[in-house]
Amino acid sequence: MANEVDPSSSIAALFGLRVRRLREAAGLTQSELGKRAHTHSTRINQVERTTGSKPTLKLAQALDGALAADGLLVDLWPYVHRETFPDWSRKFMALSERAVAIRQYAAAVVPGLLQTEDYAREVLSVGLTLKSPEQLEERLAARLGRQARLTKPDAPELWVILDEAVLMRPIGGPAVMRDQLARLLSAADDPRITLQVLPYSSGAHSALGWSLEIPTMPDGSEVAYIENGHRGQLFEEPEEVKEFAVTYDRLRALALPPIMSLDMIRSVMEGTYLAERIPSRSERRRLAQVQLQQPGGWQLRRGRPQPPRHRPRP
């Protein structure tokens, strides 16, 4: 067909072509498929022609079921979403998804595998490589989709060191941070996940200014990935990876023990971000003025109830 999407142009185009061919083989119109997948025919058209945002994992699952694709579309979906991220991160993401163990040091933000949706949206929205709101939604869906691996029987062992700055930086505001820190505490209930906090008091160290991740592959080999802000670099040479592994071990030695780390996370959640719910001085002043204008407001003027003064009768 003259208007057929070229499947070699991108994985998203291949996904769209597979959807169209499966739909036609099933004798369904776009409208009929949309109803089966609980979406609109326009969305089906966008997926098939790759003219809109990339499909979410939920939509891929719905299409897979509606078309009896036997997992084909769901299996293809992660590769579709890797294209929403910069080139320098795609190979690392592919390796990380196969890892049986992951060691991470996070210098600035909570690692993606442990982010809440609101926190992830705030972090992704400031990326220098972000081109559109649609791409933001694509990256958000991909990040949240990757988290599903932590709930599977073959989930990797995850050891995360969080710089204290990660806890103190109020990304998204107090409510978002409270939910995010609560997410960390609940994640630590999983015996496969270990959290440590590297406190400010640890001073200077060899990973200042960048984050580090070391995935271990099923064959026992390792790679290292460092990231600073909006750029990353993958290292695969054994000697280089070994140097980063030593760096990580030193960070782990400087960090608080896991139990103390969880106590610190809980303290920041219940203290720092709960305290920020207290109104500011100007807000308290405006509130007091409103209360003074209400019936009984005279009781607030001196901080304790004062009976009204009665004028003597003439």
Image (cartoon, rainbow, N blue to C red):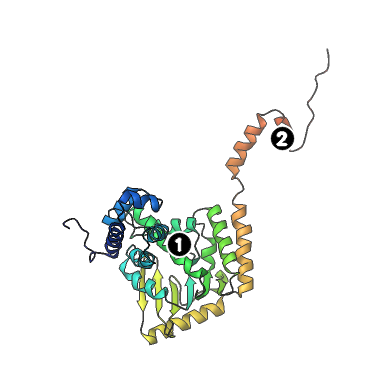
Dot 2: element: helix
Where is residue 189? Give x, y as percent.
Answer: 61, 69
Asked if one can make out residue 252 in the rendered structure from this viewpoint, the answer is: yes
- As drawn, 59 above or below 41: below
Q: Nearer the viewer, residue 14 or 236?
A: 14
* Identity of the residue furthest to the front in this view: 27
Q: State the quadrant of the N terminus.
A: bottom left
- As drawn, 100 above or below 298: below
Q: Nearer the viewer, residue 49 or 247?
A: 49
Where is residue 77? Give x, y as percent.
Answer: 36, 64
What mark, if any, has residue 300 been given in the picture? 2
Mark before the other along the chain sequence, 1 or 2: 1
The crowding category of the residue bearing disc 2, from other C-alpha atoms within 10 Å (few below 14, some 14 to 19, many at least 20), is: some
The crowding category of the residue bearing disc 1, from other C-alpha atoms within 10 Å (few below 14, some 14 to 19, many at least 20), is: some
Which corner quadrant of the image does residue 252 belong to?
A: bottom right
Dot 1: element: helix
Where is residue 160? Give x, y as percent.
Answer: 52, 72
